[in-house]
Amino acid sequence: MKKLLTVWALFICAATQAQDCGNYLFLQNNKTVEMTIYNKKAEPDGKQVYSVSNVATAGGITSATLNSEMFDKNGKSVAKSTTTVKCNGGIMMMDMRMNLSAQQQSATSTATANNVYIEYPSAMNVGDMLKDGSFSMNINTNGLNQNISMTITNRKVEAKEPVTTTAGTWDCYKITYSSKTVVKTAGIGLPLNMDGTEWYAPGVGVVKTESKYGGAAVTAIH
């Protein structure tokens, strides 16, 4: 009887984890998520369209391919890229390359690197400090060898508040962070430092971002 209870408990745990992972926007097969991009004056300046495919679960980890296309404010396609997102026991793992510019994302979509994911735990509390993230990779752009590295640090859950866009309303955790991006060419590069804020809806994902350069928000889900 005790063994049966243990097996049943493990089954419930596994089912709950799979359900937690399946609710994320970027882990729903054939889902399309549109994010409007805003400039520093909070004016619409384009959009990023994500399409989800190849959702699969193996070894308790759910993963999906995320195809991204960026459009300028006139609706012209300016860059495409492909990344991967993962979820393990409700912990969402986003590819940090999504924080790069559209052109950088496009250049790195075929490159490989280790530890490119940044984690969003299934349970958060105001005041929590979240794990840092970092990655580095070498790319070749039109015959030019470059190295791109990024670190995201000081990730703090500052508050819990609702976010409303044309796509819906979510109860979110407001997370602040610091990032440093360095693009080196021939060993020479200058760092780009930035402080940012993002609003994360548990079981859904990041639905809004802001920095001194502008921001983005989920405005349509298909």
Image (spheres, grey):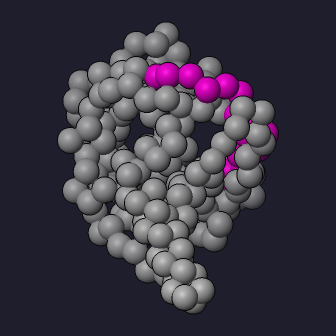
- Front position in the image: 195 or 9: 9
Whether residue 188 sits left or right of residue 121 in the image: it is right
Q: Is residue 171 visible?
A: yes
- Relative placement, left or right, of 141 versus 212 is left
Depicted 174 relative to depicted 9: above or below: above
Outermost residue toward the top in this view: 41
Q: Where residue 57 appears, x then y in whole percent? A: 40, 74
- Quarter where residue 118 is shown: bottom right
The total of numbered circles placed on residues is 0
**Main secondary structure of the magenta stretch:** strand
- Relative height, residue 95 to residue 211 (above, below): below
Question: Could you tell me residue 28's position as x and y percent?
Answer: 31, 56
Q: Is residue 147 magenta?
A: yes
Q: Residue at x 53, y 31 (%)?
A: 172
> Residue visible at 46% across and 63% down?
16
Q: Position of residue 112 (x, y in %)?
A: 54, 71
Locate residue 124, reporting x and y percent.
66, 42
Q: Give the residue displayed 46% in from the left and 13% down from the top.
A: 42
Q: Residue at x 43, y 68 (%)?
A: 15
Q: Is residue 109 visible?
A: no
Where does the C terminus fall, quadrant-wise?
top left
Range covered by the magenta-colored residues = 145-163
